[in-house]
Image (cartoon, grey):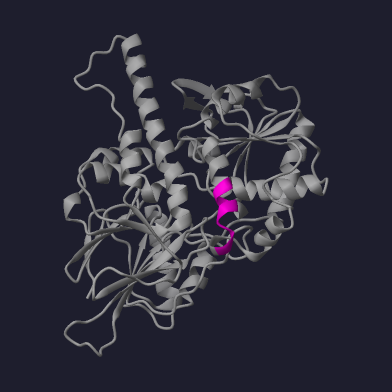
Amino acid sequence: MPLHFLGANRQVTGSRYLLEVAGLRILVDCGLFQERPFLTRNWEDPPFDPRSIDFLILTHAHLDHVGLVPRLVAQGFRGPIVTIDATIDLAKIVLTDSAEIQEEDAEFKRRRHAKEGRKGRFEPAPLYTLDQANKALKQFRSIAFNEPLSLSPEVTVRWIKAGHILGAGSLQFTIADKTNPGGEPRRIVFSGDLGLWNKPLIPDPELIPQADYLVMESTYGDKDHDVQGSVEDNIARIVNETVAAGGNLLIPTFAIERAQDLLFYFSKLTRAKKIPMLSVFLDSPMAIDATQIFVDHPDCCLDAETVEMLRTGNSPFKFPGLRFLRTGEESKSINHIRGSCVIMAGAGMCTAGRIKHHLAHHLANPATTVLFVGYQAQGTLGREILERRPTVRILGFYTPVRARIEQISGLSAHADRSTLLRWLGGFQQPPKKLFLTHGEEAVSLALAQTIREKLKWDVEVPEYQSVAPVE
């Protein structure tokens, strides 16, 4: 049973695995590469025939796990795409938004090339179109958490809550032995992206007792989140300091989970009067749509505290001063507001979207604060700002970085080193092999060494396009 590692290997984004088992070819995730050194991989033909894939199984709806699905379908994949119901709803907005951005970026480059008099052999084109994204969405099929799905008489898979974002699941494949009907089946587990315990909105990760082979993410595998004080207190401090300086607070925001977590905290702080009454803008149509999906899926995907808040009319997604901005004109109008405000806009790593325009407008102002609340991959604009480079390139121009830069790790949707070890502690015995993926090379290697020393497990950090036997 060969397992092919086709993304997020010794780097973070582009999660994609091909499992060949019992006559089936199963693709697990099909994500977009987002780090600059690896962007060309998005345009390469996959190292397999898309028409040969029987199933595409998705862990969750983040772009680096689903962002290449429309391209896969356009290249000939015709099988079912199976995942949790809430993930399907989120994938609809993620993929259509991605397609629109692809089309807009291609058109912007065409106009710029024409203005500059460039005459190239190839015209800028989108990675995929909105029509292709909508066509891919027709192949999605829903499943519930902990409901076994039979892929063949020998192979089943079930989704187990991962605590990462709404609808995120780990996958446990169970493979029966045809040659020994009464024998113990083999189990292959993909962690997907794992979250933290005791987070707002989302249930805690569930432990899995058995795995013969385990593929686990390692995004923060070399450290624990450095949280000085509570997340709530840190947000209050940063808001109050920014208001005192007379500036605006810019928060590059992932539309799914991080935006809703932030609304949860701003709601609490506003109602408790720990921050002054000010305008809080959620400047992201995708985040606005995602927030409604949270409301639509309380029973399967939200924790008990959030369900009770919604039931009693104290929604964490509604509070005085909150404004949802959908149109580009509404977004531009923020520039004319006098006095301090909070602007939450995507994309979370500043790679695209409205946050780039807000950064271009405010980053040179020392009164501005830019608050990062999520992972910033190497090679992204967010990482460059977080590293406090003197200037960064935004929208084709170099902008000085004079704003105050802050980061809160406690809002991360990703498990840290201690949480990953806690999750591994749920297994009743070590797997035959643990593969670490979805982490920068140095980080994955550091976690591998920690696990070897603490747990004495057999750990491997696979290379891109490597193949491992799963026996």
Does the magenta run of residues contain 294?
A: yes
Q: Position of residue 73 (x, y in %)?
A: 26, 45
Q: Residue at x 73, y 53 (%)?
A: 313
Task: Report the number of discs.
Answer: 0
Q: Is residue 219 visible?
A: no
Nearest to the observer: residue 88 or residue 422: 88
Which residue is depicted at the point 58% across and 27% down?
A: 358
Residue 122: image x %, image y %? 21, 22
> Which residue appears farthest toward the right when viewing the image?
273
Q: Is residue 415 magenta?
A: no
Residue 331 percent location from the top left of the image: 59, 26
* Dominant SS in magenta: helix
Residue 297 in percent (x, y) is at 55, 56
Q: Quadrant of residue 115?
A: top left
Q: 173 or 468, which lies in front?
A: 173
Q: Residue at x 68, y 63 (%)?
A: 305
Residue 57, above or below 30:
below
Q: Quadrant of the N terminus?
A: bottom left
* Magenta region: 292-299
Q: Nearer the viewer, residue 363 or 18?
A: 18
Tell whether 53 sits left or right of 130: left
